[in-house]
Amino acid sequence: MARRLETPHGEALAHVHAATQSRAALVLGHGAGGGVGAPDLLAATDAALERNVTVVLVEQPYRVAGRRSPAPARQLDAAWIAVVQQLAAAELEGLQLFVGGRSSGARVACRTAGELEAAGVVCLAFPLVPLGRAGASSRLPELDAVSVPLLVVQGERDPFGMPPATDLRTVVQVPGDHSLRTREPVADAVRTWLARVL
């Protein structure tokens, strides 16, 4: 089921995959240039549904409007917060809330997890170090700011780098690069982590 939701920056699209006996919800965002059909997002969706977790895949307003170039971070964050809050008051009401996404979507989820009072965060292919920008600083502070259990699933050959694990942050290396096209290892990482945190 797809639901159109208004945000301060245009209309977003929420694709709801309801679990049969849902005990939690996982809301996932897409990468900067891709959509909600990315292999790792679909793998995470399958894994969560197996754990009786309802999944919502969110298309940011810029994608719904047909633009490839992402909106500025503050607009992405504001639209994301608006969408998740509307979902939490409707389809996901009463469910333990987890947020996440791939690449850019993972960054948005990390930056907003506190405000949304998320119980945990799932990051697929977190872009740790910007490519091709000399002197650009690491985005590790965005991961470090998350104060709830955090899963990072990262390709072994991801050119954006590999974040370190911490007490709260589980880092799982899987075959592949930033695209994370090997679905089963991604699904297995998400499945195992959800079993532990739920």
Image (spheres, helix red, strand yellow):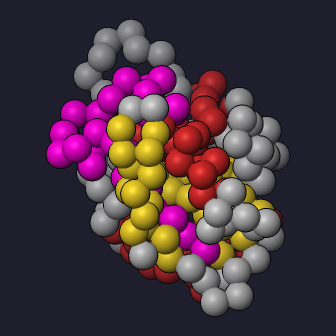
Q: Is residue 125 magenta?
A: no
For the point 55% across and 70% down, the residue is: 55
Q: Position of residue 165 (x, y in %)?
A: 69, 45
Q: Position of residue 178 (x, y in %)?
A: 35, 50
Q: Is residue 181 above or below residue 32?
A: below
Q: Is residue 35 above or below residue 108?
A: below
Q: Position of residue 3 (x, y in %)?
A: 43, 64
For the point 33% across and 29% down, the residue is: 71
Q: Is residue 142 left or right of residue 180?
A: right
Magenta residues, as a range? Answer: 54-78
Q: Is residue 67 magenta?
A: yes
Residue sitting at the far bottom: 20
Q: Is residue 46 left or right of residue 92?
A: left
For the point 64% across and 48% down, the residue is: 85
Q: Position of residue 80 (x, y in %)?
A: 51, 42
Evaluate whether residue 131 shows in this view: yes
